[in-house]
């Protein structure tokens, strides 16, 4: 199989699968990734007095309100 057909097939499959993802965006992935990183890097004693961070849906609603 030539490399062109392989790349074309791989592109088609990736585009097809990306259409299956619904209601998930790059900005959501970044937001959740940063929240997870912050949660993992802070000690439990540091998180004890702080409220739980907003999930992405709550963040979007709050952002639209302002």
Image (spheres, rainbow, N blue to C red):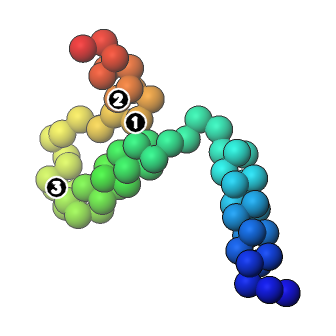
Question: Viewed as shown, does residue 27 lie left or right of 38?
Answer: right
Q: Earlier in the sequence, mark 3 or mark 1?
A: 3
Q: Secondary structure at mark 2?
A: helix
Given this view, does label 3 or label 1 mark the residue nearer the observer?
1
Identify the residue at horizontal 74%, vertical 78% (top origin). Answer: 4
Identify the residue at horizontal 75%, vertical 60% (top origin). Answer: 12
- Residue under label 1: 55
- The image shows residue 39 at horizontal and vertical percentages of 28, 55
- The span from disc 1 to disc 2 (Cα, nearest Å) is 6 Å
Labelled pair 1, 2 in contact (Cβ < 8 Å) = yes
- Against 9, is 55 above or below? above
Given this view, does label 2 or label 3 mark the residue nearer the observer?
2
Depth order, front residue of 64/4: 4
- The image shows residue 66 at horizontal and vertical percentages of 24, 14
Say which quarter of the image contains residue 11: bottom right
- Residue under label 2: 59
Question: Viewed as shown, does residue 62 lie left or right of 43?
Answer: right
- The span from disc 3 to disc 1 (Cα, nearest Å) is 21 Å
- Against 16, is 53 above or below? above
Q: Secondary structure at mark 3?
A: helix
Q: Disc number at residue 45?
A: 3
- The span from disc 2 to disc 3 (Cα, nearest Å) is 25 Å
Crowding around mark 3 (Cα neighbors within 10 Å: few <14, some 14 to 19, many 20+) is few
Question: Viewed as shown, does residue 32 lie left or right of 8?
Answer: left
Identify the residue at horizontal 23%, vertical 63% (top origin). Answer: 41
Identify the residue at horizontal 31%, vertical 53% (top origin). Answer: 34
Q: Earlier in the sequence, mark 2 or mark 3?
A: 3
- The image shows residue 47 at horizontal and vertical percentages of 20, 49
- Against 37, is 27 above or below? above
């Amino acid at each position: 199989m030539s490399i062109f057909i392989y790349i074309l097939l791989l592109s088609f499959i990736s585009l097809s699968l990306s259409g299956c993802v619904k209601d998930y965006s790059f900005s959501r992935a970044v937001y959740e990734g940063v929240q997870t990183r912050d949660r993992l890097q802070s000690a439990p004693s540091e998180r004890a007095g702080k409220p739980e961070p907003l999930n992405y849906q709550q963040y979007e609603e709050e952002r639209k309100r302002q």
